[in-house]
Amino acid sequence: MRPTEILRQEHRVIERVLDCLEALAARAREESLLDREAAAEATSFLECFADRCHHGKEEERLFPAMLRAGLPRDVGPLPVLLEEHERGRASLRGMKHAVGANEVEDFAAHATAFVELLREHIRKEDAVFFPLADRLLDDAQQAALLQEFERFEHEDVGSGRHEELLAVAGRLWERFGNPGAEPLPRTTFACGHHAPSGHRALELP
């Protein structure tokens, strides 16, 4: 298992919630009414899973490892990805404010911008940046990074938090997802954490 495989698995979960967020925003526009409970749940999930967990592992673990291995800091893909992380955070703040103020159009606008940004961001990482990481980091560096991911999950995110977040994603998918879509593949990895021996595999409905 490579660190980038963990991050790709997280992308698949994030994409499902982006689909839900898009449907939630469309429904809000059509009905001129915001489902504030669902919107708050989706925004909280994206803050915790997509930003703190996923982007946290990238910014605090993967990117520094790649810089140490020779990746340029100020040119190439890294500054682009970091700038997109910041734009995503701005959209999340906008969504959170709109939910609190019950501003339907503002929520829909911020949600739509976030969905478009994250889908393109994920495409760049999957197609370009993660293959670059796999080439740049040798086996020993990748093994060390896996251990760093594990520590990040326990010390920075919190043990058991990934299961709670996947449950949120599952609830959102049941309400707003495409019932004809393929289910998320079963995995013993969630949010970068490997399930201990005997732990049930996690999946979305």
Image (spheres, rainbow, N blue to C red):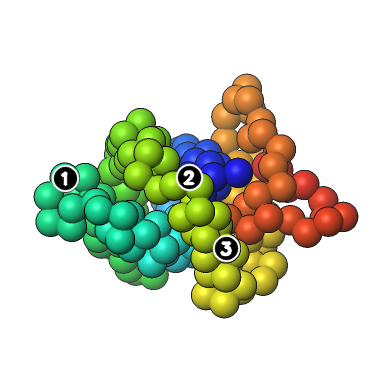
Secondary structure category for the residue under label 2: helix
Q: Which amino acid does label 3 sit on?
A: Gln
**What's the residue at 46%, 55% (across, down)?**
141
Residue 21, picture quadrant: top left
* Residue to which mark 1 is pinned: 76
Tell me the distance, in whole angstroms, between the alpha carbons under discs 1 and 3.
Answer: 27 Å
Q: In this view, does 138 lie to the left or right of 119?
A: right
Residue 179, picture quadrant: top right
* Residue to which mark 2 is pinned: 4
Asked if labels 2 and 1 touch by Cβ distance under 8 angstroms, the answer is no
* Residue to which mark 3 is pinned: 147
Q: Is residue 117 left or right of residue 180?
A: left
Q: Position of residue 107 (x, y in %)?
A: 33, 54
Q: Can residue 95 be spotted in the picture?
A: no
Q: Residues within 10 Å of mark 1 (few under 14, many from 20)?
A: few
**What's the residue at 63%, 58% (across, down)?**
193
Q: In which quarter of the image is the C terminus?
A: top right
Of tags 3 and 2, the one toward the viewer is 3
Between 160 and 182, the residue placed more toward the observer is 160
Q: Where is residue 9 in the image (x, y as percent from the top left)?
A: 55, 42
Q: Which amino acid does label 2 sit on?
A: Thr
**What's the residue at 24%, 51% (across, down)?**
71
Q: Position of residue 160 (x, y in %)?
A: 69, 67
